[in-house]
Amino acid sequence: MEGNSKAGTTKLSRAITMIVLIILFICFIFPFLMVVINVFKTKGDINSAPLSLIGKHGFTLANFPKAMEKMDFVKVFTNSLIITTSATVLTILVSTMAAFVIVRNAKWKACSIFFSLMVASMVIPFQVLMVPLVSVYGGLFGVLNHRLTLILLHVGFSVSMAVFMFHGAIYTNIPLELEEAAYIDGCTRWQTFWKIVFPLLKPTIATVAIIDAMAFWNDYLLPSLILQKKELYTIPIATQAFYGTYSTDIGLVMAALLLAMLPILILYLFLQRYIVKGVTSGAVKG
Amino acid sequence: MDKTKMSYKVSQFLMFAGPAVILFCGTVIIPFIYGLYLTFTSWDGVSKTKPFVGLANYAASFSDTAYWQALVRTVIYSAFSVILINVVAFLLAYLVTSGVKGQNFFRAGFFIPNLIGGIVLGYVWKFVFNRAFVAIGEAISGGTVPSLLSTTGGAMFCLILVSVWQYAGYMMLIYVAGFMSVPESLKEAALIDGCTPSQAMKNVTVPLMRASFVQCIFLSITRCFMVYDMNLSLTKGEPFNSSVMAAMHVYNQAFTYKNYGTGQAEALILFVVCAIVGVTQVYIGKKGEVAA
């Protein structure tokens, strides 16, 4: 009897949990739903009935080509892609190498000094550095409006966190004996790093790559300070500029917002497990 | 080769860590020090000379009422956001670890807002507040309803709501990891000893998850204090500058009004306030930590 009622309550509590989860889920995706249902409507229909599924004038795809053209989406997307991939790859290469020498030669003064500097600097927010950055790289060197400047700055900002994570991975997961065996077999240090250590870091590389790529892709403030020419705009800057010009043409805004979100949502559809795992392990370590 | 020689050490260090060190110094260390120097000058961003003005910028920051208003506003916004983010995230984590069907699907779904940058999210929500919620409000009340974003208190409320929505899914993942790290056997032992499930939660699970709480609160404090993108796209500081957060004020001070020195001094003060709050929280949190 007692067992029966217990099974009953767990069944009931499961059902309640499920209903609560579904309601919360709908709340969470509500803003995206709004964009999706309105993007296929005309401007007039959005203004008169933003909540209806289909507008009076029916279903339209006209917002997309117009928004794509006005936002120069293909170029903007390519810019974002070039900057994100090169900055991510560079971050990985540069920080795995640095972490390797820092772990294996922990007794060297330079290693310990830079490692503690990097760890300490992780608390410095970007706002403290943006004014001097603009004055050094804009005023002193005049290298604004170059993709390479932005890429190198992205790498510079993410290197400390990445080194910290690779430091942990090398320290705990890579046995020194493996490297010693390679040295005995005649490998140089450089070869040993790339042939033995680097491949073993794959799981951490995936984590760091996911965290950094997402941060680079979505970053607005740094790119907006460095890239002021229209042909260099990344997706967030282009979205902001687009909204400034076409905010009254709400159909186009909907299309632009959907276009801005689509690449990362599609990627999430395929790599969801890795992204969730990467972000969690990154956060827990950081 | 003699591995204790200085030249060996230097060449090895430069070969492996050289690129990282150069980029790190170029983007963080040098600008940080140069930024300190800038706070003692009255530079307008254009002229070649940077006149030395001593502590004038700090004096200007302390007498800049708009800045202090923005700072107080940021503290209020952060307090509400941090509490709500963590309450919602903890509840979500509890629900998605309770063993219902499709919990991975829900976890993935709640995380979606984190994939998209603050600029785009802000515009999406601007549409929701200005059109969708207004339409719902008008359907219910039958009259015209102003958008929440157009009222002074409403704009703050919107910023908090969107922040909670944005970060709850991310913090949820950390709490989920926390829940998983509590050994099942301890919970069972508590239940056998006569605890009710809520007592077991309060006296066993939550104390053991202390590290997750410390971490989530730290992350949400630092993010809320430095909010900029979403502030820019959602409210732009409107109406009547009632939703200008500290980071936006710093940006405007430096880049719009060209008071680089004062802007930099205000950025440093913001950083110090944020660091003190964050570090105090971690210190208090870690002190009472218990191990399983």
Image: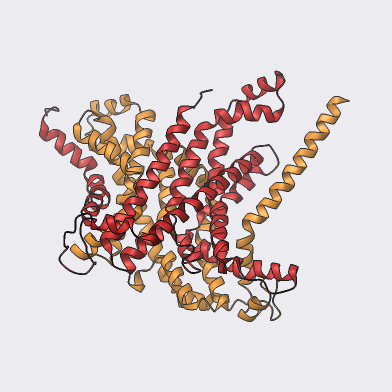
Q: Specify whether residue B100 is in view.
A: yes
Question: Does A187 sit left or right of A34 as displayed?
Answer: left
Q: Quadrant of residue A188?
A: top left
Q: Is residue A184 above or below residue B130?
A: above
Residue B89 position, x and y percent, is: 58, 44
Q: Specify whether residue A133 is in view.
A: no
Residue A165 position, x and y percent, is: 38, 38
Which residue extends farthest front?
Answer: B63
Q: Nearer the viewer, residue B186 or B1?
A: B186
Q: Nearer the viewer, residue B277 or B211?
A: B277
The orange one among the chains is: A
Task: Name which residue lies at 23% across and 62% down.
Answer: A135
Question: Does A111 sit left or right of A264 as displayed?
Answer: left
Question: Does B217 sit left or right of A108 as displayed?
Answer: right
Location of the N terminus of chain B (image quadrant)? top left
Q: Quadrant of residue A204?
A: top left
Residue B109 position, x and y percent, is: 61, 51
Q: Nearer the viewer, residue A37 or A123?
A: A123
Question: Does B58 sit left or right of A18 as displayed?
Answer: left
Residue B212 position, x and y percent, is: 51, 35
The red one among the chains is: B
